[in-house]
Image (cartoon, rainbow, N blue to C red):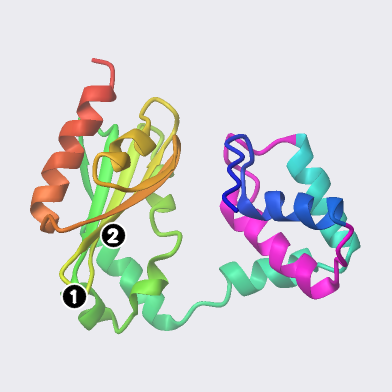
Amino acid sequence: MNLIDADSPATAQVLYDIITESRMPLTAEIASNLYVGLMTDTGNFRYRQTTARTFEVAARLVAAGADPTDLAQSCYQNFRAERLLLMREMFNAIHFANRQRVAWFYLGPESYARSGATPDETEGLIEYLQMVRTVEAAFVIESLPEGLTRASMRSRGLVDVQKICQEFGGGGHRLAAGLRTKLDPAALEKKLLELIAKQLPE
C-alpha cells in the first residue's frame, strides 16, 4: 500500500491516524515512537506544515504514555563527543553564495576520520545553516562508501527543493528533500547551486 498525504507534516501523524481509525492499540511504546517521529519531522513543531492538528496528535500521544521531556533529551541531548567534533568539521566547511541566500557544506571521509564520528551522526546538522536569517536554501553533501554522493536539502519556501531532487531521482517535499547520485561531490555542488539560483528571485 502506498499512502501519500502531502499535507501531513510527518509520517508519524499519518500512522497515528491509521492506528486510531483502525482501532489498533496505542501503547506507551507505540505512542513514544510516534511522538519522536512527529517531533523530529516537524523540527520540534517549528516547520511550516505544522498545524493545530499536529499539536492535537502530540497531546494524545503524551496522554497515551509518551514522555516529551525524556524523549526530547534522548533525541537532542544524548550525543557522543565525536558528533561535537563532527560539528567542528561542519563549521569549518560552511560556504555561502548568492548574497548569503544559499548555504552548504560537504562532509567527506576525511571529516569522519578526523572527528571519529559516523555518517548517521549528521542528522540535524543542516539546521544550523537555516539559522542564518538570509538563507533561503541549504544543502549538505556527503560521500557514501559505495561510490555514491548524497545530498539533503532544505528551503524556507522560495525554493522548491523537491523539484531539484527529482532531477536526480530523489524526492521529499517542497521544503525538505534528498537525493543520491553517481556524480562526484564537486559536480553535484555545482549543479545544485545552478538549480537553486534559477528559482531565487533577483
**Residue beneath the point at 18% across and 75% down:** 109
**Quick check: 118 left or right of 145?**
right
Asked if residue 1 lies in the magenta stretch, the reply is: no
Q: Of the residues tagged 1 and 2, which is closer to the observer?
A: 1
Kind of residue at badge 1: Pro
**From this viewpoint, is residue 116 visible?**
yes
N-terminal-most mark, 1 or 2: 2
Q: Say which element carries label 2.
A: helix
- Give the numbered dot on residue 91: 2
**Quick check: 54 left or right of 112?**
right
Circle 1 is placed at which residue position? 109
When asked about the image quadrant of residue 96, the answer is top left
Q: Nearer the viewer, residue 166 or 202?
A: 166
Kind of residue at badge 2: Phe
- For this orientation, the residue located farthest to the front is 1
Asked if residue 27 lies in the magenta stretch, the reply is: yes
**Quick check: 54 left or right of 43?**
right
**Residue beneath the point at 11% across and 43% down:** 190
**Residue beneath the point at 46% across and 82% down:** 80
- Residue 76 point in image, percent of width and height: 57, 67
- Residue 74 point in image, percent of width and height: 63, 74
**Residue beneath the point at 88% across and 67% down:** 25
Query: What stretch of residues is rendered in magenta?
Result: 23-51
Q: Say which element carries label 1.
A: helix
Q: Residues within 10 Å of mark 1 (few under 14, many from 20)?
A: few
Could you tell me how far apart the alpha carbons at marks 1 and 2 are, in whole angstroms? 16 Å
**From this viewpoint, is residue 135 visible?**
no
